[in-house]
Amino acid sequence: MSGISVVICTYNGKSRLNETLHSIVTQKVNPGLLWELIVVDNASVDGTDEFVQNLLSINASHLTWKVVNESQQGLNYARTKGLKSAQYNYVLFCDDDNILDANYLQFAFDLVQKYPSIGVLGGHGIPLFEGAKPEWWNRYCHSYAVGAQADADGKIQEIPAEVYGAGAIVRRLPLLNLFDNGFQTIMTDRKKGSLVSGGDVEWCYLLQLLGYEIWYSSKLQFQHTMPTNRLEWAYYLKLKEGIASGVALLSGYEFILKNKRGGVAGYVFFYGKRFLRSFIALSVFRLKMSLNKYYAETADLGSVTLTAKYKSYQLNVKRAVKHYLQLKNSFIQSQR
């Protein structure tokens, strides 16, 4: 059905959701736009479900909404639950710490309707600091799902292309058909006690394999709340470690998107080269560190990210090859 489903995935989000929900229920939309709001409670234990039910009962009588529960922890599981619970053909994923501009929904819908080639449309996050802005912020802020995602609006030209999941609009039916036919994603994404990420990237890759494009619009703006604890250097290092930990798991997508009909031997060779590069990069870094060539900040960041990448390739060989075989069966053999 032509319309848009707004999905908020949350874990213990009671303290964060008030402004996020307010920005959604007050969206300025044209009378003809069909839309709904779905909150996916990902096994919260802080009363999030009851809080959302009470707030929306009072403030959202003008729209269709519901709260659904996903007991398996992991952002990717929650997003999949939202995708399956939605009734419209576009899904806008709004994080529980995002505050959407008033015209976000209508502008996003108009754009994806105008360009049917769009598989995922990313917006522009603007940081809303609850504490002091760190000195290092401007150098590394993209990892926080803020800032421009491309040099210009429109189709992102890189292969493979990706946008962050916060504020992203996803074409629902192609993914839903894939999942209903038994396709298993490899990323779980963030969950309690873990910052391993990449589920949003995986969905971008999947839609590209299905023939769609990844777009970005600087006019789709939202505020992304940055609490004090996320502005600490230690948190940033954990965030980067989580991002780097998923590189090997996503390598099958990259290989197929760049090589189209590459075989198993080709993928194993591709994986091996990436593993060797990660080993060499880590070894060279450690050598430079022993010669005191790096400042402390760079040393911390380099050590965390390069070690995580190396371990990702080292520990995930069997899992990555198994997933590649699934990709090959789903996207390569089906094209012959």
Image: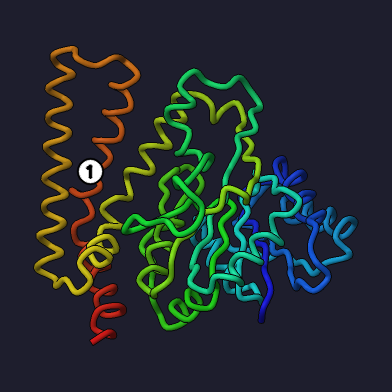
On screen, residue 210 above or below 135: below
Toward the viewer: 141 or 239? Answer: 141
Q: Relative to residue 156, is residue 147 drawn left or right? A: right
Q: Position of residue 237 (x, y in %)?
A: 40, 30
Q: Residue at x 65, y 33 (%)?
A: 128
Residue 204, compared with residue 34, is above or below; it is above
With respect to residue 126, does 62 lie above or below?
below
| Residue underneath mark 1 | 311
Query: Which quadrant holds the N terminus?
Result: bottom right
Residue 199 or residue 253, whichever sits in front: 253
Q: Residue at x 41, y 34 (%)?
A: 238
Q: Answer yes or no: is residue 315 visible.
A: yes
Tell whether 175 sits left or right of 34: left
Where residue 336 sits, quadrant-wise, is bottom left
Q: Point out residue 46 in the picture as x, y percentages from the top left corner.
A: 69, 46
Q: Residue at x 75, y 54 (%)?
A: 24
Locate residue 25 relative to residue 153 in the image: left or right: right
Q: Dot 1, crowdedness within 10 Å: few (<14), some or many (≥20)?
A: some
- Residue drawn at x 61%, y 72% as measured from the top left: 113
Q: How many marks?
A: 1
Whether residue 319 is visible = no
In this view, which residue lies farthest toward the top? 292
What colour scheme does the image use? Answer: rainbow
Q: Position of residue 225 (x, y in %)?
A: 64, 37
Residue 293 spot, x, y in % from top left: 19, 14
Residue nearer the viewer, 334 or 153: 153
Could you say which quadrant of the image residue 181 lies in? bottom left
Three-letter code, disc 1 = Lys
| Residue in front for this viewpoint, 209 or 74 | 209
Does dot 1 land on a helix, a strand or a loop?
A: helix
State left or right for residue 250 relative to residue 268. Answer: right
